Image (cartoon, grey):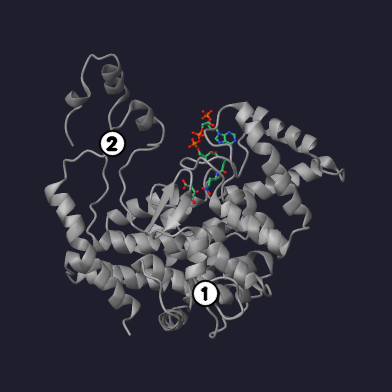
Amino acid sequence: MATLKETLLAKIQEHRPRTQKLVKEHANVKIGEVTIGQAIGGARGVRMLVTDISYLDPFEGIRFRGKTIPETFAALPKVPGSDYPYVEAFWWFLLTGEVPTEQQTLEVVKDFQSRRAVPAYVGDMLRAMARDTHPMTMFSAAILSMQREALFVKRYNEGMKKDEHWEPTYEDSTNLLAKLPSVAAMIYRLKYKDDKQIPADPKLDFGGNFAHQMGFPKPYDDVARMYFILHSDHESGNVSAHTTHLVASALSDVYYALSAGINGLAGPLHGLANQEVLRWIMKFQEKLGGKESTEENVKQALWDTLKAGQVIPGYGHAVLRKTDPRYIAQMEFCQKNLPNDPLFKLVNMIYKVAPGVLTEHGKTKNPWPNVDAQSGVIQWYYGLKEWDFYTVLFGVGRAIGVLTNTTWDRALGYAIERPKSVTTKMLEDVASQAIKADDLGAD
Ligand code: NMX
Ligand code: MLT
């Protein structure tokens, strides 16, 4: 039976000639143009990244390796007695594009278990940090603190050839990913449970052990599996994925790169929106002072937020132009498992009202909810009420996607990222036709 690493190498060898041919024979073929609006407006819609791990269609939403979310969940081997697949099977699938067998999955489960132990110095460092430090800061710092483990650096210093770069990157990625659930649980229990840590259970899988170390009973293991897979990848242009890719493009190892990506995820316009949704809901309920929520008072609260110049967290998207299928997947989970939960009912009421309010407000290009609008409700229901921890959960999931991407970036020899900048005066001159865009100079 081929191992994951052997299967991955075969896929890499099969893929390399495609990339090499494109670069050699078609490098000058245009795939788009850049406008002044895009240069100032966050490069929205500029096609300048390449990934085969996932693709985001504005109307359909995400496909992982060509599969929609329901297709992905249906295809992968499930943990016995669980509704959701092994995260380890998903890791195999993202890395290779192939659905692993049960036996291949169990090999990866074993491999992850053997790499899971978190170095003692990580706990020492976290304990030395101020206890009110945000959990995302702790998570990023914990990842960075393990940079001394990077095999890539050792091999690079020994003179490794470029076409071998993927191999220590794969090893580093697996070593790091296997530790992340335990690191996250350690931060959670350090901050909110008087540092009463729960040792890892060597028999459990990625999601199962995370639930165990967090201290949450079943079905939280399935919640964790679903959550990590849903948050894993959203093609390459989102802030956390792009940051990881950018930093790794300098051949910084994955500890440096993922820590940087996590810092991007910690922004309220990106992953932190999941904590902001819960904060918004709690503030709204506090204002109601025990009165029942109605469509009318929800509408009023949404308008109050917009009139105060703030965003409605969990709504809008830079690419999506319909309800995020990750939102729908979580909504369906709630309909099955917590249909009468008051918070779930309130989130549904917001879903009924907010798109109309945002459309009337007239600014956002997408008035529909994204992944973050629904995710906190599930965590809250199962007892994880410390909402400033929610983005760490997103971060564990996002690591799966960005580490896969970094491994493939190295395999295909993607270049150091270095776009060109221009000055405001240059843009003014092009706009007034004093000079032509072509006169700005090449490359
Ligand atoms: N509430 C209020 N205004 C909004 C919202 C929203 N939810 N979404 C977009 N707008 C505004 C936006 O601020 C901008 O205003 P201005 O022209 O004054 O700068 C205008 O609408 C046009 O923005 P768009 O082009 O529709 O959106 P953009 O691509 O710039 O930004 C987000 C995308 C996701 C950053 C934006 O929709 C947003 O801030 N949403 C709320 C925060 C959120 O839920 N983020 C999580 C995204 C998913 N994730 O996990 O990363
Ligand atoms: C993500 O999952 O990264 C977010 O939906 C943001 C994005 O795709 O831009």
In which image quadrant can residue 316 be found? top right
Q: Estimate the x, y position of residue 317 in percent, counting from the top left.
A: 51, 41
Image position of 215 (left or right of 89): right
Q: Position of residue 35 (x, y in %)?
A: 32, 28
Front-most of residues 124 and 73 = 73
Instruction: List the residue tagged with mark 1.
Output: 206
Q: Is residue 150 something one can see in this rendering? A: no
Of the numbered discs 1 and 2, the one sitting upstream in the chain is 2
Q: Residue furthest left?
A: 25
Residue 437's place in the image compared with 183, above or below, is above
Q: Residues within 10 Å of mark 1 (few under 14, many from 20)?
A: many
Q: Residue at x 79, y 45 (%)?
A: 285
Judge: label 1 CB < 8 Å from ligand 2: no
Name which residue type carries label 2: Gly
Residue annotated with mark 2: 32
Viewer-nearest residue: 146 or 64: 64
Q: CA distance from mark 1 to mark 2?
A: 41 Å
x and y, in percent, of residue 194 in the image: 69, 70
- Dot 2, how many residues are within 10 Å of its Cα: few (below 14), some (14-19), or many (20+)? few
Left or right, 30 with respect to 84, comes to: left
- Residue at image location 18% in from the left, 26% down from the top: 438
Query: Where the N terminus falls, by quadrant?
Result: bottom left
Tell me which corner region of the image, top left, top right, bottom left or bottom right, holds residue 360.
Answer: top right
| Residue nearest the viewer, comparing 105 with 265 | 105
The answer to whether residue 349 is visible is yes
Q: Amino acid at mark 1?
A: Phe
Query: Which corner quadrant of the figure contains ligand 1?
Result: top right
